[in-house]
Amino acid sequence: MPSPSSPLLPDERLAAGAARLAEHARIRTDLVVPTERLTAERPDALAHTRGLGSGPTRVLFVCSHNAGRSQMAAALLAHHAGERVTVSSAGTHPADEVAPHIAQALTEAGVDLADAYPKPLTEEVVQAADIVITMGCGDACPVMPGRRYLDWPVADPDGAPSAVVRDIRDAIDAHITELLTQLAP
């Protein structure tokens, strides 16, 4: 696979995106839509990394499976900030799907998670971020110079009862509110 700094042709980007998603998928079907989404996000991330793109602050949320905490945080920040930020999320060992109880907790709060899917953490997505917020991935998260790193110690909602998931959602929302006060308008 070419390095993140070498340009990829559209077919190569599609193949590379499919390969990254397939590494972690238990079922090799239903990869077309996530592969297309991941492939579409990569050129923008690469352009930002190379200084070719401008725009809002880019925030990346990372947790182990990208099925709970990081998905909640990304959805909540996108909901509250709109176009003020570019939001993404990834996991060191992505799950097959976003946990249904996470989607339910966000739906209850009026936040849409319909297009969310677990994505692998890649060097290029970290390089493209201005702020990287880790949520329980520990030493598995790569550190890139020049990025602002925050670690939010938020409980893992995996297998938690609905009331606990709501508390975790609310704790993440409080962190999001604080983050938004720190970002330029």
Image (cartoon, rainbow, N blue to C red):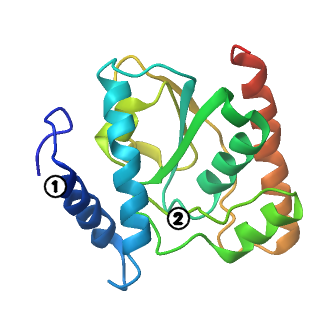
* Quarter of the image where one finds residue 44: top left
Provide residue 2's location: percent of width, then percent of height: 11, 45
Say left or right for 14 vs 168: left
The amino acid type, in three-letter code, at marker 1 is Glu
Q: CA distance from mark 1 to mark 2?
A: 21 Å
Say if residue 142 shows up in the picture: no
- Which residue is at 65% across, 70% downward? 158
Quadrant housing the C terminus: top right
Number of residues whose C-alpha sits closer than 10 Å to that of mark 2, classed few (under 14), some (14–19) or many (20 or more): many
**Which of these two is toward me, 64 or 44?**
44
Q: Quadrant of residue 68?
A: bottom right
Q: Indicate the secondary structure of the residue bearing disc 1.
A: helix
Residue 141 visible somewhere in the drawing: yes
Helix, strand or loop under label 2:
loop
**For the residue marked with disc 2, what is the amino acid?**
Tyr
Residue 108's disc is none
Q: Mark 1 = which residue?
A: 12
What mark, if any, has residue 117 been given in the picture?
Answer: 2
Check the image and report above or below for 29 versus 179.
below
Residue 167 found in image quarter = bottom right
Q: Which residue is at a point 67% across and 32% down the rendered structure image?
A: 83
Contact between labelled residues 2 and 1, with CB atoms less than 8 Å apart: no
Q: Earlier in the sequence, mark 1 or mark 2?
A: 1
Up the image or down, 78 lies above or below 179; here it is below
Q: Position of residue 33 (x, y in %)?
A: 43, 70
Task: Point out the residue furthest to the front here.
Answer: 10
Looking at the rendered image, the disc whose residue lies closer to the viewer, 1 or 2, is: 1
The residue at the point 39 percent across, 16 percent down is: 146
